[in-house]
Image (cartoon, coloured by chain):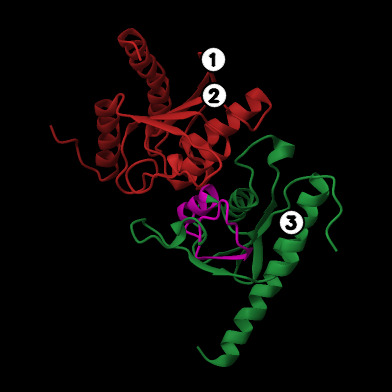
Chain colours: A green, B red
Amino acid sequence: MAEEDSMIDIYSHLYWMRFAYQEAEKAFEEGEVPVGAVIVLNNRIIGKGHNLCETLQDATAHAEILAITAASASLKSWRLENAVLYVTLEPCPMCAGAMINARIHSVVYALEDPKAGACDSLFHLCEDPRLNHRVRVFSGYMREQVHSLMSAFFNQLRGRQPVQ
Amino acid sequence: MAEEDSMIDIYSHLYWMRFAYQEAEKAFEEGEVPVGAVIVLNNRIIGKGHNLCETLQDATAHAEILAITAASASLKSWRLENAVLYVTLEPCPMCAGAMINARIHSVVYALEDPKAGACDSLFHLCEDPRLNHRVRVFSGYMREQVHSLMSAFFNQLRGRQPVQ
């Protein structure tokens, strides 16, 4: 890859991750674990979502699942080939599995999840050669901002001020 | 376990699996890959679903996900502790992950899925000690009937009569 292409790619990932971050902020404001996702196809957001598990009282209402359902409605197709999913937190097994089922091309996440991450941390579901589709995995964009947002949420939950 | 308890357990699993099978038959009639699921709590079905991926054009619309969402609405809680999920086909990574997220107590499936099964065949997600919840796995109830239903569906799809 030429250096110029590589730089465009990095800036593009940062550009779209900001929208996923905005979704995470909405979750924060609604008292939900702040995770947000957007799905991009041909330089356009075709679906977005933020975690609504508490609001909807539904454990399947993760940001990625809601974004996939929205994108599928937008395309009128369950096949999201060539689409890229941007999400602030490393997807769990449910969401990694959903991305595979929906034929998502790539996932870009900001912050790793050592407790449930299924792309890199605990499992490598997205790139498992035994499944009928593989999702390419990229990570680390806006990691520090997402880490701060998550810390702020959990500190608030514990009734503590963030450590300065 | 006393022999009597064990027998009750087996008959109970068979009893509830029949309802999951009825859901699978609905999917078959609607031209969907025939997979059905019910969720049972305190000897009552609190949620059911059948595969609707083609009808809804949504790759997340597996029987198990729809059943979990229905059961959560029924209980007004995302926590499905002590509930048992009966499903005709071994859950995929998405559905195994959803059962973990929803704190399902046990899953009972009829037929293994060597291509995508995430409970026994390709992965053992349900009982992974690193995750924050474990789902007990039982299998094999009504296996032959489900195998026949699946074969009939895929033979029909390929325009062939079932092999006698």
The chain holding disc 2 is B
Q: Are marks 2 and 1 in contact (CB under 8 Å)?
A: yes
Q: Is B19 displayed left or right of B140 in the figure?
A: right
Q: Is B146 displayed left or right of B52 in the figure?
A: left
- Residue nearest the viewer, comparing A47 with B6: B6
Q: Is residue A108 magenta?
A: yes
Three-letter residue code for mark 2: Asn
**Circle nearer the N terminus (2, 1):** 1
Note whether A77 is above or below B26 in the view shown. below
Q: Nearer the viewer, mark 2 or mark 1?
A: 2
Q: Are marks 2 and 3 on the same chain?
A: no
Q: Which residue position is annotated with label 1?
A: B42
Residue B130 pos. (x, y %):
50, 47
Q: Which residue position is annotated with label 2?
A: B82
Residue A78 pos. (x, y %):
51, 51
Q: Counting other residues with Cα less than 10 Å from the Cα at mark 2, is it few (<14), some (14-19), or many (20 or more)?
A: few
Which quarter of the figure is the N terminus of chain B placed in? top left
At a point 57% along the width and 55% down the height, the residue shown is A91
Disc number for residue B101:
none
- Find the distance from the CA under tag 2 to the CA under tag 1: 8 Å
Q: Are marks 2 and 3 in contact (CB under 8 Å)?
A: no
Residue A145 pos. (x, y %):
75, 67
The chain holding disc 3 is A
At a point 57% along the width and 56% down the height, the residue shown is A114
Q: Which region is colored magenta? A: A93-119
Res. B71 image quadrant: top right
Does the image show residue B41?
Answer: yes
Three-letter residue code for mark 3: Met
Disc number for residue A150:
3
| Element type at mark 3 | helix
